[in-house]
Amino acid sequence: MEEKFTPDSQYLVQAHDMKMYFPIKTGWFHSKPLKAVDGVSFDIRPGETLGLVGESGCGKTTVGRTLLRLYNPTGGEVYFDGKKVDAKSIGGLRKDMQMVFQDPYSSLNPRMTVEDIIGEPLDVHKLYTSRQDRRDKILHLMELVGLNAEHATRYAHEFSGGQRQRIGIARALATNPRFIVCDEAVSALDVSIQAQVINMFEDLQKQLGVAYLFIAHDLLVVHHISKRIAVMYLGRMVETADSNELNSNPIHPYTQSLLSAVPYPDPKQAKERKRIILEGDVPSPLNMPSGCPFRTRCRYATDECKAKMPPLTDRGGGHMVACWNK
Amino acid sequence: MAENILSVQDLHTSFTTDHGEVMAVNGVTFNLEEGKTLGIVGESGSGKSVTAYSIMQILEKNGSIRSGKVLFRGEDITKWPESKMRDFRGKKCSIIFQDPMTSLNPVFTIGWQLEEAIKLHTDRKGKAAEERAIEMLKLVGVNEPEKRIHQYPFEFSGGMRQRVMIAMALACEPDILIADEPTTALDVTIQAQILELMKDLQKKMGMAIIIVTHDLGVIAQMADEIIVMYGGRVCERGTAEDIFYRPAHEYTKGLLRSIPSVDKIGQRLVPISGTPINLLNLPKGCAFCPRCDAAMKICLEQVPPETRTVDGHLASCWMAVKKEAEAGMINFTGDSGRSLKADDTAGAGSGKD
Ligand SMILES: Nc1ncnc2c1ncn2[C@@H]1O[C@H](COP(=O)(O)OP(=O)(O)OP(=O)(O)O)[C@@H](O)[C@H]1O
Ligand SMILES: Nc1ncnc2c1ncn2[C@@H]1O[C@H](COP(=O)(O)OP(=O)(O)O)[C@@H](O)[C@H]1O
Ligand code: SF4
Ligand code: SF4
Ligand SMILES: [Mg+2]
Ligand SMILES: [Mg+2]
């Protein structure tokens, strides 16, 4: 019997047992659920950053999109500021929950001017009193993200990757949100530019108190920006902990190999470090292994792992791990 | 010292476009030693791939080598006819690309494609070619290769396709393997597998490797020698230790400062200001000048010469020249009448945020 979930007022965002299955056609009349997200729970405090990492296809983007109800979830509950997010309430909450996308090249309409791109959410939510007010707001947003006011009338395609990412962020900030899902928002950028954008995310958080779900596959970036980190594998959360704790004391075998695989920009460390090289690939989410999703690549796997899915349990101080043997 | 198997000398490559001439490579020089790994690192658009494609002479139609030499075992291959180059490409030097999907043909089986490459570049035919294909797949860690050769690329994951590309590239036992961002499209755990595989195969087969990447972590792990590129030029060259522990070029220093690392948690990152270079309109002096916080007047006017740093590696930066002068290694005024005083700082850093 499932206990009823009660939201906790200290958190801004809470996801409880969130599920998102996509029906995949397997024949004329048959389809099979692809379990992109399968029972994921987490909380984010106001003004805090939760990092979300995991391999391509493990369900990170789907978590972000389901959270913002860009998908209609298969199961579970999401609360924002104590209010349940559902088909009815989401309209009123859109303003507060925004998203920044991965690809600065394709996520903005190249034929729109910067002014129009940033102004669009202002128009949609009618967030200005006059033409002048609209313009002032746009210029203020541009200033916040470090864009030159004289760029307002230029087209998106005239900008570099880093600048486009700033435009996308200014647009997300236009409605003065309290929460932003950043999906690989810096991944396509060169390191020197990436650092500019990461600093900007941090400054905006300090200035405006906005909370982030920061999705990225680069662990060094995620560790830098996040207070807590959640690690996903095949649609499930396998470990969450404070960033420093996760980095110094990874417990789940998948997290351990993930951390050991990060190529550190230091030749001595690179040579000395012991890597845990995983065998094989991530299984297809259409053919999920029974029990623990990681068991096909795990060197500690036992019969128990095959039979039962391990639950996330607290190993002390909120360090949550889903593993039978660690 | 080991022999240089490849020597690139003052290479210039450009592309003709509607907007003008894109100066992608502007005087690149380096040596590759037999059996060693050279890393080429730099941000996107710095000319890394174009350098690699120039060596292979596989540039797009609008591009060409304007000047310079590419010596393979002492012979300038830029002078070779296409027929001889075709031979070079298969037998002497192979290349693998970033995206293994676009480099494999989706309508043919993995086995067919591997066998074609083998037949083209060796005298193996029929059964012998198939055996070699299976042997190569086994070597790169593809399980059940006898079955796998009958499958199509879409049935392989990204990591497995990259293994196939490596198998194909090494099937003819080339002397040089060029890997252009070989793991950029892959997840870190798969990246670790592929990098490990490349090192392992190098030990077994002894080929020299040129690895091209924008990822400082990958380069730290793979390269014996490193060249850092910016604006189509080499800014700095040295061993991995020289570049990571004793960077002398302001761009290299900036790159290393801007990457997040575990020791920098809680600190603000130090980015490089400004935006990437426009190759249609190269600055007259140092290409990095518009973004450099240490820029001096001379940086605006003259391309910095390659200078030996105090610890013995090479950097092309006026700041390094100045340091050397301060250390009393060379005499400036006696040189070419250049004077380098601290008050030369010209505030050249325009375009800052
Ligand atoms: N609209 C959709 N229809 C069907 N399957 C989908 C859909 N969106 C995502 N999936 C599948 O769900 C799984 C999770 O996808 P998701 O995009 O969330 O991964 P991700 O972790 O963000 O990966 P990446 O790092 O590559 O961005 C994948 O197997 C993907 O193919
Ligand atoms: N076919 C082409 N036509 C015009 N410009 C090109 C062409 N190929 C590459 N370039 C330009 O040459 C420069 C260097 O490219 P490249 O070597 O691919 O950079 P990277 O260092 O990222 O590998 C870039 O500015 C790129 O846009
Ligand atoms: S539950 Fe078993 S298979 Fe899963 S990670 Fe733990 S030991 Fe490995
Ligand atoms: S100090 Fe001068 S030469 Fe060196 S990187 Fe800066 S601008 Fe270039
Ligand atoms: Mg994604
Ligand atoms: Mg490239």
Image (cartoon, coloured by chain):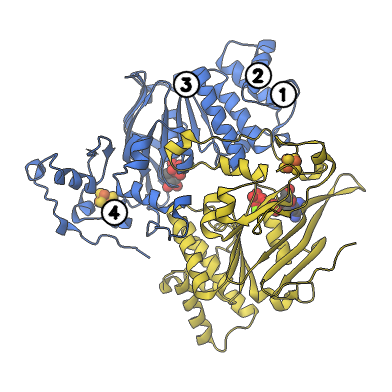
Q: Is residue B333 above or below residue A207?
A: above
Q: CA distance from mark 3 to mark 2?
A: 19 Å
Residue at far right of view: A29
Which tag is nearer the camera, tag 4 or tag 3? 3
Q: Secondary structure at mark 3?
A: loop
Which tag is nearer the camera, tag 3 or tag 2? 3
Using the image, tell me which numbered label, if any, was put on residue B149. Answer: 1
Q: The numbered mark 3 sits on a residue in which chain?
A: B
Residue at far front of view: A316
Left/right of residue B148 with respect to residue A228 in the rendered view:
right
Q: Is residue A186 above or below residue A166?
A: above
Instruction: Residue A285: give x, y in percent of width and height.
Output: 77, 45
Whether labels 4 and 2 belong to a single chain: the reply is yes
| Contact? badges 2 and 1 (CB < 8 Å) | yes
The residue pinned by badge 2 equals B133
Q: Secondary structure at mark 4?
A: helix
Of the numbered discs 3 and 2, the one sitting upstream in the chain is 2
Packing grade of label 1 (10 A; few <14, some 14-19, many >=20) is many
The quarter in which the C terminus of chain B is drawn is: bottom left
Packing grade of label 2 (10 A; few <14, some 14-19, many >=20) is many
For residue A215, what is the image quadrant?
bottom right
Whether labels 4 and 3 belong to a single chain: the reply is yes
